[in-house]
Image (cartoon, helix red, strand yellow):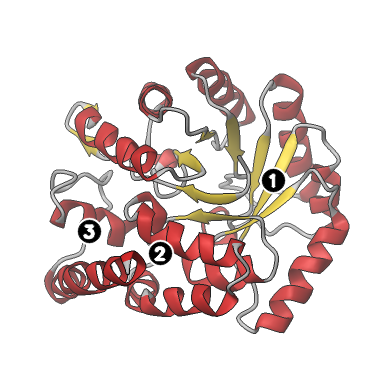
Amino acid sequence: MFTGLSAFPLTPLDAQGVDEIAYIGLIRRLADARVDSIGALGSTGSYPYLDRAERRRAAELAVAHAGEIPVMVGIGALRQRDVLRHAEDAQAAGASALLLAPVSYQPLRPDEVYALFEAVAQSSSVPICVYDNPRTTHFSFDDDLYAALAALPQIASIKIPGVPADPDEACAHVARLRGLLPARVTIGVSGDAFAATGLNAGCDAWYSVIGGLFPETALALTRAAQAGDAAKAVHLSQELAPFWDAFTRNGGGLRVVATAATLMGLTKPASLPAPLAELEGEERGRLADMIATVIPARAARAAG
């Protein structure tokens, strides 16, 4: 399950907690598109903002409505105690894998991060994906820590924060990482603008924000790269550049895809956890135009 497209859906909220109808709809869209895996409760799924009951329910619903698609569930939290509780809940819900980021308030040391992953690995019966996201966790993995974590038997994939923009440098970067890791541990690229370059450079998976809302679009790019058609993968990514630019302007993809989901009628307005809010004004209008033009045009070309 740690290859191909792993699509990360939103976790839409309402006054009662998880908006179950909307969330089920998002999960079923991904299952119907036949993504390779679903990443529930990732950063796009707002996991740090949810309490234990909300996270447990989101995991249960994702597994229940994903059909045959494996579901990976995010378990990150500030305290190791809570991480272990979330891991227990995710496994009880039937998750096929766990996604763990070293969330912190006080800066973490590498030995503390290793101890966290070791504790989770010892108590888990499903594989774990290492979530390297320095923008949100403020922790940066080094090569020594990558290698040490990969030696833990439960570690099955590392989600890296992008690759160099230059294709040759990207290939060298992925090759260097590959040399640190056992063959059983896959490398997945994140940061959607880096997806084509990362996949073409040899990454095994794309852990995708946009794939959680537009799975067919993300699958077309992924399958092109997997088939060795690097030029097509790059071209498909370039067509999505307006979305990548919107992600950059708005502090990442979450607000963009949440607003897009509302505009498409997939979620209710204000489904983000406050104080996070959807795009307004000019940005919202630009996004509406992108949904109406970029996505249909991309889908039409893929169908042709």
Nearest-to-viewer mark from 2 and 1: 1
Q: Give the alpha-carbon distance from disc 3 to disc 2, as whole Å.
A: 14 Å
- Relative placement, left or right, of 140 versus 298 is right
Q: Mark 1 points at which residue?
A: 157
Q: Mark 3 points at which residue?
A: 260
Q: Which of 238 and 270 is in front in this view?
A: 238
- Residue type, mark 1 in image: Ser
Residue 72, placed above or below residue 227 = above
* Residue at figure coordinates x 47%, y 29% from the top left: 68
How far from the left and from the top, in percent, is residue 62?
39, 29
- Relative placement, left or right, of 80 versus 175 is left
Q: First in sequence: mark 2 or mark 1?
A: 1
SS class of the residue under badge 2? loop
Q: How crowded is mark 3: few (under 14 residues within 10 Å), some or many (20 or more)?
A: many
SS class of the residue under badge 3? helix
Q: Quadrant of the N terminus?
A: top right
How far from the left and from the top, in percent, is residue 106?
61, 48
Image quarter of residue 166: bottom right
Q: Which of 61 and 120 is in front in this view?
A: 61
- Residue type, mark 3 in image: Ala
Q: Mark 2 points at which residue?
A: 252
